[in-house]
Amino acid sequence: MDQLSLSTLGQHLQSLRLARGWSLSQLAHDAGIAKSNLCRLEQGNGNPTLDTIWRLAVQLNVPFGTVVAPITVPLGEDGVQVRLIDQGKDTPHVDAYWMRCAPHTLRRAEAHTAGTRESLTLISGWLEAGPEGATTPLQPGDTITFAADQPHLYRTQEAEATLMMTITYGIKGETP
């Protein structure tokens, strides 16, 4: 991620945290990351992983897209790139992403907030995705929807995979 994007993300995270009246220590502890890492991130330094950003979004009780909305470059690590395309304004909240997985990628994702669902439509390549132990192979044009409030994964083989992903966040107390 370029320096401007890191700085923008850091300022945005800090404003989300301060709007809740939380200290660095409180958010870092609740998200399971080191306070020094969160401090560096808010200062526009460091290189946050996708999982770190997810954990911060969960603790801030906002969709992942709300945290990354000010950034226009793809976020990525370990062969996976994602970019927010659009955020819905209705309930339930729905975010749309473009995602690319490099060849021979295995990306394990932590469980998202309760009631969250993912829908994936493969554009090109081959992808196996879904909850761990219950994945589905996808060919171009295939779509799957699964509960993302449990650990899940994305796996490619020889070719990269490009897909559209929508994340539908559950309403507290309800399951979609």
Image (cartoon, grey):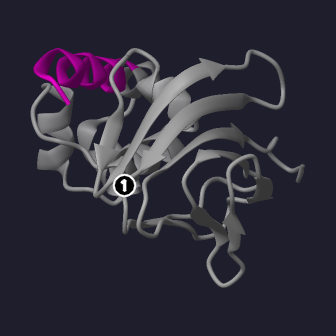
Q: Quadrant of residue 148?
A: bottom right
Q: Can residue 26 be seen in this view?
A: no
Q: Which amino acid does label 1 sit on?
A: Ala
Residue at the image position 57 percent from the left and 60 percent from the top: 126
Judge whether 19 appears above or below 94 on screen. above
Mark 1, residue position:
102
Q: In which quarter of the image is residue 51?
A: bottom left
> Where are the magenta residues, as a range?
1-15
Front residue of this view, candidates 68 and 15:
68
Judge whether 166 appears above or below 108 on screen. above
Q: Position of residue 55 (x, y in %)?
A: 43, 51
Residue at the image position 51 percent from the left and 64 percent from the top: 110
Residue at the image position 15 percent from the left and 24 percent from the top: 2
Front residue of this view, candidates 1 and 164:
164
Judge whether 133 appears above or below 1 on screen. below
Residue at the image position 60 percent from the left and 55 percent from the top: 112
Q: Where is residue 145 in the image (x, y as percent from the top left)?
A: 79, 55
Residue 14 horizontal side relative to residue 128, left or right: left
**Label 1 Cα neighbours within 10 Å, binned few <14 / some 14-19 / many ≥20:** some
Is residue 3 inside the magenta stretch? yes
Secondary structure character of the magenta stretch overall? helix
Q: Can residue 153 be seen in this view?
A: yes
Name, please, the residue furthest toward the bottom.
133
Is residue 33 inside the magenta stretch? no
